[in-house]
Structure formats: C-alpha cells, structure tokens
Amino acid sequence: MPQFDPTFYAPQLFWLLVTFVVLYILMSTLAMPKIGAVLEDRQRKIDDNLDKAAKLKAEAEAAIAAYEQALAESRAEAQKILRESADALARQSEAKQKELGDRLAAQIKAGEARIGAAKEQALAHVRDVAVDVAKSAAGKLTGVTLDDSKIAGAVAAAMQEGR
Amino acid sequence: MANPVEQFQIEPLVPLHVGGVNISFTNSALLMVISISLTMAFLTLSVRSRALVPGRWQSMAEVFYEFVANMVRDNVGSEGRKFFPFIFTLFMFLLFGDLLGLVPYSFTYTSHIIVNFGLALTVFIGVTIIGFMRHGTHYLRMFFPHGAPILTAPILIPIELISYMSRPFSLSIRLFANMTVGHIMLKVIGGFVIALGVLGVLPFVFLSAITVLEFGIAILQAYVFTILCCIYLNDAIHMH
C-alpha cells in the first residue's frame, strides 16, 4: 500500500503544513470576517426591522385610537344635531297645527254666526209672509180687515205651537 | 483489472530536495492546493454580493460557517471562539479533501495516514499545551477522575493515559481507513462493471449506490474528525 511507504512522508507533511497554514491565514483574515460580517449585517437588519415594525405597530394603534375617538365624537355630534332638528321640527309643526286649528275654529264660529243670522232673517220673512197671507186670506174670506198686530200675534202663537 | 491500491500512489510532479529533505510537489500536494483554492473561492466569491437574502452559493457558505460555529459553541463553549478559525479551516480542509477525492482520476489526500496523522498530532499537541497552560500541573488530574477511590489509581491512570495518548492515532486511522476502504471498494466494483460486460449493469447499480454512500461518508468523516477535535479542546479547557 502506498500509504505505508515512508518515501513520500516528508513531502506530504511539508505540503500539508504549507497549504494548511496558507488556508488558515486566508480563512481567518479574508473569508471568515466576510461571512461573519454578512451574518452580522443580516442580524442587525432583522433587529432593526423588528424595532421598526414594533414602532409602526404602536403608531398604527395610536392612529386607530385617535380615529375611534374622532368617530365617537362625530357620532355624538350627529346625534345632538339630529335631536335638535327633530325638536325644532316638532315645535314648528305644533305651532302650525295650532294656528290652523285656531283659524278653522274662527271660520267655524263665523259660519255658525252667519247661519244663525240667515235663519233669523228667514224666520222673520216667514212671519211677514204669514201675516200678509193671513190678512189677505181673512179679507177675501170674510171681507174684514183685521188689525195687523192681531194677525201678527196669532201667527206668532201658531208658529210657537208648530215648532 | 487495475490494481485497486494504485489510486493511492504518490507521483512526484516537481521533484524538490532542500537540504537533503524531499519536499517534491506531488499529486497529493496538487490536490491540497486545489482544495484550499476551491475552499477560498467558494467562501469568498459566494458572499461577494453580501446579499441580505442569500442566493444558493451564499446560503451554502453561510450554512458551513454557522454549522462549524455551532459545533464549536456547543462543544467548547464561549472560550472556543478563538479556536473557531482553526476548527473551520480543519473542517473545510478535510471536507474538500474527502469530496475532491471522489472526483474520477483525482487523488484523496485524506486517504494517506501521514496527512491525517500530521493534522491529528498537531491538534493533540496543541490541545495538550492549552491544557497545561490553563490548568498547570492540575491538568494531570485528567488521568485520574475526581471521586475515584485512590486504590483504583494503578489501574485507572494507565488506562486514562493510554486512551489520551491514543487520540491522535484513533483520529487519523479512522479517517484513513474510511477513505481507503471506500475508494478500494469503488475501484473493485468498478472493475466488475467492466469485466462483466452486459451483466455489469448489476454492479453498476450497486456502484452508483455506493458512490452516494461515499459522499455521505466523506462529509461524515470530516465532521467526526472535527467534532472530536472540539471535544478534546473542551476537555483541555474545562477538564472533566
């Protein structure tokens, strides 16, 4: 087996020493600091981003709280306005209703008064006509001219009975 | 059929002798150079864009980095941070050595026990020095656990000493044996595919499955070597 032939022990050990030492120096001065820096950068970036995310989250929560407060305030405001306008409308319509009712009552009263006057008048006419009719009928039937006041009395009594 | 151990043959590409020592640039050295070049190219080019959301290559580089970083942190603790570059280098060197060895016609330097032993011995000596530097002579308590009856010392101390001393051997032989056996098996079964002609389809299916397994073993053995180094390092730093 070539592994147990000591002829090439010396050159192998020599080149092992050379290559291993070179690799060690290059690794510790060049490769490892580079990889280490990359890993460190990433870790720092991740930590930074986590911090940033936490900050943004806090900001977002504050914004949500402010928004909700504003919402609640404007809701209250809207309710107030709504209530006020409802009250105003109710008052207005009540006033209008009252005014209308008053006017109608006045008109009804006036109408009733007119109807009463017309009735009086009509009754008065009826009495005059009845007196005339009774006077001319009595004159034609009996040839007697009756006193107007007597006839009027009789008519009044008749009308009183007929009522 | 080709000799299945021929693939482990060292070929000097540039013969070099300095002060009577043979330091020829061999195919093994070439693969080591390719391995560290690819490692550096992979780890630096992939993170060149420094993307926040990594692409495929960058993710892979990050996965390796974090995998080894976690391995060091879980096994050694926070004191292990200063050994992280060494452990990461060790892992990448072994991983690329194992994986490049699976490329046809290439060479597997981790299948050579001397390479593994060189690495394991370095770790062993380093860990022992760290242990004595941190704990002084108290580090010798490693060989005699706390709370054990003093009468057991004649048995326990040799056992602990032998198990401690055998660490570099077990480390290097484990990797060497896995790599060597895997490659011999691939070679032998590959020989069957050619020799059996049309019937070679059967060993070819088996060969494909074994190849997938060998990729798994390549990664696993690099991991095992590295994590055992982490555990030894932890022993030296914290004792047990």
Image (cartoon, rainbow, N blue to C red):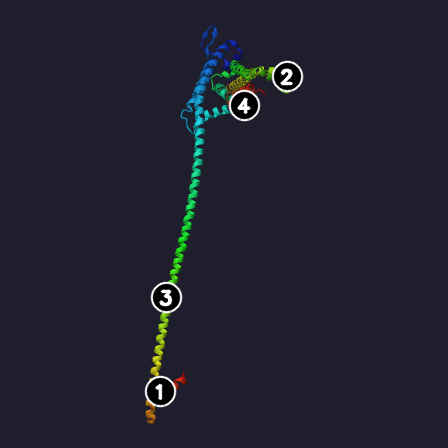
As drawn, the label of residue A100 is 3
- The Cα atoms of the two marked residues, 3 and 4, are separated by 102 Å
The front one of B171 and A106 is: A106
Q: Badge 1 local density, few (<14 within 10 Å), some, or many (20+)?
A: some
Residue A131 horizontal side relative to residue A55, left or right: left
Parent chain of label 1: A
Q: Badge 3 local density, few (<14 within 10 Å), some, or many (20+)?
A: few
Work out which quarter of the rendered image holds the C terminus of chain A and state it: bottom left
- The Cα atoms of the two marked residues, 4 and 2, are separated by 25 Å
| Residue B73 in sight here | yes
Residue at label 4? B75
Disc 3 residue type (three-letter) = Leu
Residue at label 2? B156
Residues tagged 1 and 3 counted as in contact (Cβ below 8 A)? no
For the residues carrying marks 2 and 3, which lies nearer the camera in this image? Answer: 3
| Residue ID at (43%, 32%) | A48
